[in-house]
Amino acid sequence: MTDSTRHLLDVDQLADDEIEALINRACALAAGVGPKRLHASVANLFFEPSTRTRVSFELAAARVGMQPINIEMAQASTTKGESLEDTAATLAAMGIDCLVLRHAEVGIHSKLAAALPAGVHLVNAGEGGRAHPSQALLDAATLKSRGIEPAGKKFAIIGDVRHSRVAASGLRLWPRLGVEEIRLAGPASLLPPGSPSPGVVYCASLQEAVDEADVIMMLRIQRERMDRSGWPDSAAYHADWGLRPEHLESAAPDCVVMHPGPINRGVEIAAGVADGKRSLILEQVRMGVYMRMAIFEWLFGET
Amino acid sequence: MTDSTRHLLDVDQLADDEIEALINRACALAAGVGPKRLHASVANLFFEPSTRTRVSFELAAARVGMQPINIEMAQASTTKGESLEDTAATLAAMGIDCLVLRHAEVGIHSKLAAALPAGVHLVNAGEGGRAHPSQALLDAATLKSRGIEPAGKKFAIIGDVRHSRVAASGLRLWPRLGVEEIRLAGPASLLPPGSPSPGVVYCASLQEAVDEADVIMMLRIQRERMDRSGWPDSAAYHADWGLRPEHLESAAPDCVVMHPGPINRGVEIAAGVADGKRSLILEQVRMGVYMRMAIFEWLFGET
Amino acid sequence: MTDSTRHLLDVDQLADDEIEALINRACALAAGVGPKRLHASVANLFFEPSTRTRVSFELAAARVGMQPINIEMAQASTTKGESLEDTAATLAAMGIDCLVLRHAEVGIHSKLAAALPAGVHLVNAGEGGRAHPSQALLDAATLKSRGIEPAGKKFAIIGDVRHSRVAASGLRLWPRLGVEEIRLAGPASLLPPGSPSPGVVYCASLQEAVDEADVIMMLRIQRERMDRSGWPDSAAYHADWGLRPEHLESAAPDCVVMHPGPINRGVEIAAGVADGKRSLILEQVRMGVYMRMAIFEWLFGET
């Protein structure tokens, strides 16, 4: 980054050593190393509802000594016609040091970052279907915390890949960590258009994607998209694209299963898998707080 | 309790000495004894709106050093189809140490307590019409703070007893504290079905319940239930079931009047009684914060 | 004030030396002087949505050591029929030391102040179209922070003066600070009824109001009122009552432009003015937090 004020817009802005430092720091914090004290304030601006991500950032902020302010944008000044840039400039003028922004509009984070006054940091907490960098980074930290080295491994990403910002940020991160092959699988209309990048393959079935996979990442399916894709109900979708215990028999012997949450039990994932011994789902949640603490420390130059 | 992680589900789980310790501790805190510092975090999960109870728990949490997180469940992940168990497991994985839950569904608290990971505490802050243990306990602490000993006294509980979780928890608590007689009065359709327990009597009128009563507990009436019970408006209800100053003339000379709030002035209680010298209503609110501090201390083994 | 518990209801309650002390204290805090530690709690009761004012008070409270509690009144106990007086008495009983209240009803603040228990402070954070004292005071502190002395200056207040609580409190404050002339301009139906006070003049056009003005205060226009006043769209309103760069050519050479926010770009103010070198809009936001800190200190007898 050329600007002296750090923002986290997506994983592709980060140098390899920054990615490694963030992952290592999250793991160190999870292992009990004391966090930095930042003495700063952060505003959570969520234009889409999200309890889990907002609370994760809020807890992370408090643990590094930051004062979190929650702003529910549904009823905020933007409903009075104020632009996001003006809302951000106002918060900056009030002394807010960091904005955590979730927004459905692709590109709005980089546009806002360019408009922010120096010294005010921006974190992308979800950007349409394009990016969710803290999720990809916490997934990497989760693997690391379990001693799993991505290099040389086979990853399967399954479900509504097309609209998933988690998958989008992951597809930028995993190749840089040396992942050997990324298999994508899901309903045809829910796979990304165009040809896959090098190292990425499309699979015709869930089982084909899972065979010999080391890391299986299930994605949340929205009911509306399920309907439009030709699966009229959850049971039908689960039959074709829901991960069940028997699918894991042909995966790598020590494979792990991940999901960004919230999970739909019996839809994209069977309860027996979500709660099973190969599931890292709650570990992802746990590492999420530590990764967001590491991100705050990094923003303020402490990592 | 056999589990080593303490939960507060209802008063009947508590041993006599635990009840006594909680009441004494709340009174000590109210008298200025310094609270413990718990260094824990608590999430307020309110599936029914409640400013007063939520703020009471939030203030109590902050005073014992806990970080409170508010989650308005109307717009939370459960609207995305996540189960309450998964929401709770997610919050626990984030490092939340305690959940304060208000929910309309009877039985959901004990079900959730059984599913929580060890070390995560649950407080019942209102469970359908079944239980509201912190209210019953704070009522007991309010009496104690005024030097009123329940043993041998006559209590009157008046109004919509049938749907009141406050009355339900109270009916489990007061006999254990030695209350001599509990009179219940209210519209016939709003009294509990079946025969009264030993020590409980049904009264045909408000005046009959109040005669010689030492403690008079008025319950909030909901407009919808008033209508359906045959009282077409507030004035008609007030004429039959509203506590007015003249009713107190035949009560015990030093009787007290309580109400869990929020009060409907001129409906179940006349303003002159609510604001009168026998009213403990604001003292209940004051003691509520101290009782919730005591509950947090007890959960974490400090009381 | 005769009551020993201080409230901030409007600027006209303040003695001249109190106004001066508040302005000086806000400037000192902005210059880096350390704030007092109040060890008190404050509840933000906003019956009208306002992100900017609520966050400003919340940040100010935290910086003087107060614990802020946010209560969104749309879904609070008042929806259960509780009166504002009872809500306030309840919060006071819980140990809340200060209420920050925004409400559409004129007169409700002074009524509530009279009903509050001793020791509980009330701050008017917006009262219908009648008063918004912290905004007028922060505007004065903003001028002071830029070395602008109101005495002997010409002020122009332009737009929907009639419904503006910012203008209303300002019209009470500026004459006391020695402002020579206050020009009011805007659509005829949006000017206050009756004759102007001494020192106040009505202008027929925006340009007339701006000529030789030292301080230009633009007011936010609501779409509904614009429509009803005969300006069918934003462009038409902007043509007649929007402040544009060319208007400033005949103003005082070192004039400044203010706006309480949130601004409507291209409606009451051109982007080139809002973002221009004469704009103090973000400085107002910055000083707002310091003024509210000064107000909290003053309430508790520390200024």
Image (tube, coloured by chain):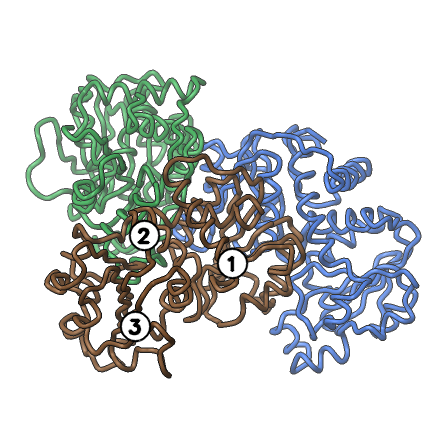
Chain colours: A blue, B brown, C green
Residue A172 in the figure: left or right of residue C207: right
Please, what is the three-letter code of the amino acid marked with disc 2? Leu
Mark 1 surroundings within 10 Å by alpha-carbon count, few (fewer than 14), some (14 through 19), many (20 or more): few
User: Which residue is rendered at x = 67% and y = 79% of the image?
Assistant: A234
Residue A217 in the figure: left or right of residue B129: right
Q: Name the residue under label 3.
A: B160
Chain under callout 2: B
Q: Mark 1 points at which residue?
A: B15
Please tell me whether mark 3 or mark 2 is closer to you in this view.
Answer: 2
Chain under callout 3: B
Q: Quadrant of residue C205?
A: top left
Q: Where is residue A288 in the image (x, y as percent from the top left)?
A: 69, 48
Q: Which residue is more in the foreground, B207 or C266? A: B207
Q: Name the residue under label 2.
A: B143
Q: Position of residue A267 (x, y in %)?
A: 69, 74
Question: Distance from label 3 to label 2 (Cα)?
Answer: 22 Å
Q: Where is residue C117 in the image (x, y as percent from the top left)?
A: 22, 40
Question: Distance from label 2 to label 1 (Cα)?
Answer: 20 Å
